[in-house]
Image (cartoon, rainbow, N blue to C red):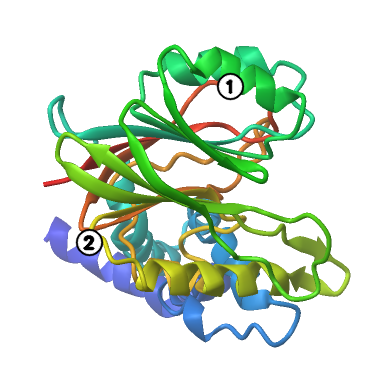
Amino acid sequence: MRDRVDVRGLVGRLGRGRGRGVAAAAVLTAVLLLCHGVVPNAVGGLGSLLESFLPWLGAVVVVLFVLALVRRSALALVALLLPVAAWTYLFGGLLLPAPGPGTADLVVVQHNVSDENADPAGTARALAGAGPDLIALQELVPPALDAYERTLAPDYPYRAVRGTVGLWSRHPLADARTLDIRPRGITGEWSRGLRAEVRTPRGAVAVYVAHLPSVRVGASGFSSSRRDESAALLGDAVAAERLSRVILLGDLNGTVDDRALDPLTSRLDVAERGVALSFPAGFPLARIDQVMARSATVRHLRVLPATGSDHLPVAARIGLG
């Protein structure tokens, strides 16, 4: 009899519709999570802006949960199951524990070191201290470049630098060359991409290092046309790569959920585990420093301690099996 009364009470509360506004917001949040691709970019880049911060819709769910409790609304609590399930489906796997030792053939570090970094030698020592096989850097400018080269040389005897991007490796490099990802309208010195073949004990891997143009958020909305064009050029280069194994390391100025990076995410796999928010370093809101791979597996991502940059370094474990 008690169980029957409880059920009737729940049905009664649902029927009265207490918390309808919270329930409607919960359903809308679930729709945005699962159908973010239908939000148009034509108006101020709204779609890309939403996708850049998509995981943060989980914070909206928490706020709605508190409101549902305050309203004592069973309707709202039931509706919240929808965005919880959607968020878990999209991002829950990233929160799983890192795979055990021995599951990675390569450890790589990706870092935009900042052209205003006051301690390049200290930054280089910190990155090398993580023990990676490969280190990819962006915003390399003289005289800081000399400090990175001197500090990394003992442990990373192989390097390739093109413009403001560079790759340091424990393994031999071959066929290093500049990658042309310059958008139209940019003149003067501008070299932000390179491709090199890394000869690992498990075979050759084509490694791409890139720094895509920045995006802007202003009164007119989300401006990303140059970033988007550069991403398309980088995607074309990856598609034409003759080696089967590819690793992309870069500051892509976009998250893997942003549709503008589809030329890359449609051709390369992203990390299986690890959130690794990398920017801004003081209060990270998004991971715009990426590690992706083809015919290889990015098993786990993590951030390293802050350096003198406005980005956090990102370390990844990669399986080549």
On residue 196, the disc is none
178 left or right of 302 in image: right
How many C-alpha atoms fall within 10 Å of the one at disc 1: few (<14), some, or many (≥20)? some
Image x and y of residue 11, in percent: 31, 73
Residue drawn 62% across the image and 55% down it: 253
- 271 vs 153: above or below: below
Horizontal side, residue 75 vs residue 188: left or right:
left
Residue 100 lies, in percent from the top left, at 15, 28
- Dot 1 falls on a residue whose secondary structure is helix
Q: Could you tell me the amino acid type at mark 2?
A: Ser
Residue 266 at least partly seen: no
Q: Which corner quadrant of the image does residue 8 belong to?
A: bottom left
Quadrant containing the N terminus is bottom left
Q: Are marks 1 and 2 in contact (CB under 8 Å)?
A: no
Looking at the picture, tell me which residue is in the foreground, 60 or 140: 140
Nearer-the-camera pick, 258 or 230: 230
Quadrant of res 21: bottom right
When the figure is inspected, residue 114 is found, relative to residue 220, above or below; the finding is above
Q: Which residue carries the number 2 mark?
A: 244
Q: Secondary structure at mark 2?
A: loop
Relative to 99, is 72 above or below? Answer: below
Q: Nearer the viewer, residue 186 or 214?
A: 186
Count of marks, rendered view: 2
Indicate left or right for 107 with 282 as reference: left
Identify the mark at residue 149; answer none if there is no mark. 1
Q: Amino acid at mark 1?
A: Glu
**Of the image marks 1 and 2, the number of the one nearer the N terminus:** 1
